[in-house]
Amino acid sequence: MTGYVLRRLGAAVLVLWAAFTVSFAVLYLLPSDPVSIILDAANPGGTVDPEQVAELSARYGFDRPPLEQYLVMLGRAVTGDLGVSVTSGAPVSELLADAFPQTLALTSFALGLALLFGGAIAAASSWSRSTRLRGALLSLPPLGVSMPTFWIGLLLLQAFSFRLPIFPAVGNQGFPSLVLPALTLAIPLSAVIAQVLARSMRTAWDAPYVETALAKGASRGRVQWRHVTRNAALPALTLLGIAVGNLLAGAVVVETVFSRAGFGGLVEKAVRTQDIPVVQGVVVVGALVFVVVNLVVDLAYPALDPRIARTPATA
Amino acid sequence: MSASTAPVLQVRDLVVEYEVHRSSSERVQAVRGVSFDVHAGEVVALVGESGSGKSTTAHAVVGLLPGGGRVVGGSVRLHDGELVGLGAKAWQQVRGARIGLVPQDPGIALNPVTRIGDQVAEVLRIHGRVRRAAAAQQAVEILRSVGLSDPEARARQYPHELSGGMRQRVLIGIALALEPALVIADEPTSALDVTVQRRVLDLLDDVTSRTGSAVLFITHDLAVAADRADRVVVMKDGEIVEQGLTAQVLGSPSHPYTKTLLAAAPQLTVRERVAPAPVPAGETPLLDVLSVSKTFRLPGHAGRTVQAVDDVSFSITRGAAFGLVGESGSGKSTVARLVLQLTAPDTGSVLLDGAPVADAAGRAVLRRRSQLVHQNPFASLDPRFTVAKIIDEPLRSHRVGNRARRRERVVELLDQVALGASYADRRPGELSGGQRQRVAIARALALEPDLLVLDEPTSALDVSVQAQILALLDRLRRERGLTYLFISHDLAVVRQVVDRVGVMHDGRLVEVGPTEDVFDDPQDPYTAELVGAIPGRRADLADLADLTPDALLERSTR
């Protein structure tokens, strides 16, 4: 078990390092001139002063060999220093720390909703013996998957903000402002969860151990809860680890649609103004979230399925 | 078992239908008007081949027909209560408490993510007899009563940590926990090794006689039925063709189908074998296996290894059939892989016609002169290929002849396996299991090999089909002078087809000799145990056939 945890931790660190390295390569090393980009970003359309270029190159270390630049930046990143924003001059880590809680609240609320909806649809469809109800329930996920996120957002705004003024349309003011964006994010994800979970629950219902349980006199509800759900959870759990990445990407769009402050706003602005240190900071934090979630998923496997990472009995 | 006592289970004119397809209203009758009784303390065997409706009948009795199946006529009475048409709640009180089910495959019949003890305790908890702590305690007692050592530790383990035989003991414990009036055992040991099968069936006998339960025993294995049942019900195509006391039905069958089944059952018949062609003295054997060993590393365990094959040597003379028998994990399949160079041995060597096969040249000769017939004809044929293309494939890959010549060869091969040219354009999906195995044999014969390695070639087939395939193999060997390495867990089958036999146990070859000697006078204690566990020995049916009905009755009431 210790070996399993250590291997997973090692893999997590490796992924973080790879994300940092690739983003460094793409942003700083590809054939372009970061200094002129920065200058242009700080002063759009202005003339380029060679002295200023030299001064900036020295400040950001662009006059050093690439390997040295990389090692210095990696060393700073490990201690939490991700550089300063080119446009505002504020430390990147501060900008991220300001935006992160908003996005965390949004995505975790959306994740909870998605699990609730997706799980309920899957459980109801696999538990039900009525083919009609099952068919109706199972036609929901394809619908949810095929609707674009921004469109769901606009639809929800139209219905619950403008027609029926229940929730605010924009802003970050407390819980009510969280509901519509979270719903927007949750609907496509819950559809995917429902699809995967419903399928693995159907498979589990056909498994011989379900017949054994029914032959004990267990009710369908008991079988669903005690035997089917836990066995079916594993494929959905794998999916969840991947889905969190999409959730972050979706949050960027949704925060823009609902004009919320957060990662979305930060990324959007950083990309527009070509604020390279901020973009890299966002990439690294995104990778960190992804890695942490997948680490949690990996560590949850052995708890759910004893066949993983348990030493088999010897004869 | 006198006629005056009411039967525990009374099935009358039972009809079960299945939907052919979800969307269509077309239905097929899987069980058509079946009637039989099971009395207290009695074991009734429901025998038949796949598709006979025996399993459907059993599932209808316990109300667990798979989706799309339903009882459309007749009655199933448990004591005095009608079970057909019972509501979900009422069924929950019957299952587990009044009818216990011992399922078919212990490998997958336990929930993989729940502890053994909890799974046993569940049946006690469902029927509300005990509190949680008491249920856990009682579960341990149940595990002890089905002969598991250290039941406290077993209760905390998960299914994958137990062997197949241990899991089937757990399932028997669950089925009998509440001492049900009726136990349905659905092929309870067909997934188990023969020595384990015997111990598990002994346990089932033991426990049911303790609880006095009536037993409905579903099996395809007539020998097992002969050993264990008081009465036998023979089913074919959803109908009962014959039923009566075991000795009567199996000793002097009246229906032609029962006779066919009996004639095909390898354990219950002694078939004449042709003597092998005499081997001229001094000729090199076709196959020489010289002290091969193979060790595998256990995945996930640094440095832990398992010795799959340990210093195994044997040789097969040209035209002979050599049987390699053993239980699962004995290493017999690894030996087959070593012979065919699908795996390289750690030490030792394999000679074909006196020449080593390990180098590239030797392997090229080996690939052409030896062929493998797989166990499962449902998986070994590409479903998208036609039969002609399947048989043609080895010819194409060895660049034999032109297109027209190869087509002729395919027709010739189909003829040899008694299928006929009309099968050439069919696909595996349109063929039965026996027909598929014939195609697999035709494919193996395409390159006119000297050596056929047959890895459990009939274990996926029904007995009557198995008998046909064994007869075909026997004929091919005589006509074409083939040499066989026949690998099987089924000693009765091996006994029919081979001249010499080797017995494997834990990777070692514990005994080798002429078939008759090994079976009639085993020298090694493990061989003796294996031979003793072959079902069909208890009932000496040849004797029984001569007995009077009165004497028969006496013998069958234990």
Image (cartoon, rainbow, N blue to C red):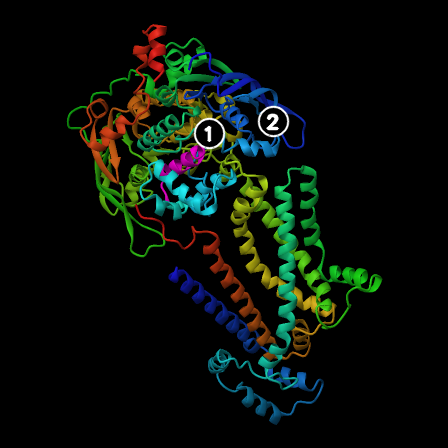
Mark 1: amino acid = Pro
- Tell me which segment is drawn in magenta: B162-179
Place residue B46 in its image quadrant: top left
Residue at mark 1: B180
Residue A249 lies within the magenta run: no
Q: Is residue B78 visible?
A: yes
Badge 2: chain ID? B
Q: Secondary structure at mark 1?
A: loop
- Residue name at image x 28 percent, y 24 percent: B498
The answer to whether A253 is drawn above or below residue B387 in the figure is below
Question: Is B372 displayed left or right of A93 in the figure?
Answer: left
- Using the numbered discs, state the Cα–Cα distance from disc 1 to disc 2 in whole angstroms: 24 Å
Mark 2: amino acid = Arg
Instruction: Please tell me which of labels 1 and 2 falls first in the chain.
Output: 2
Q: Nearer the viewer, residue A150 or B442?
A: A150
Dominant SS type (magenta): helix
Q: Residues within 10 Å of mark 2 (few under 14, many from 20)?
A: many
- Residue name at image x 51 percent, y 24 percent: B51
Across and down, in percent, residue B265 comes to 37, 19
Q: Is residue B157 visible?
A: no
Quadrant showing the C terminus of chain A: top left
Q: Residue furthest right?
A: A163
Same subunit, tags 1 and 2: yes
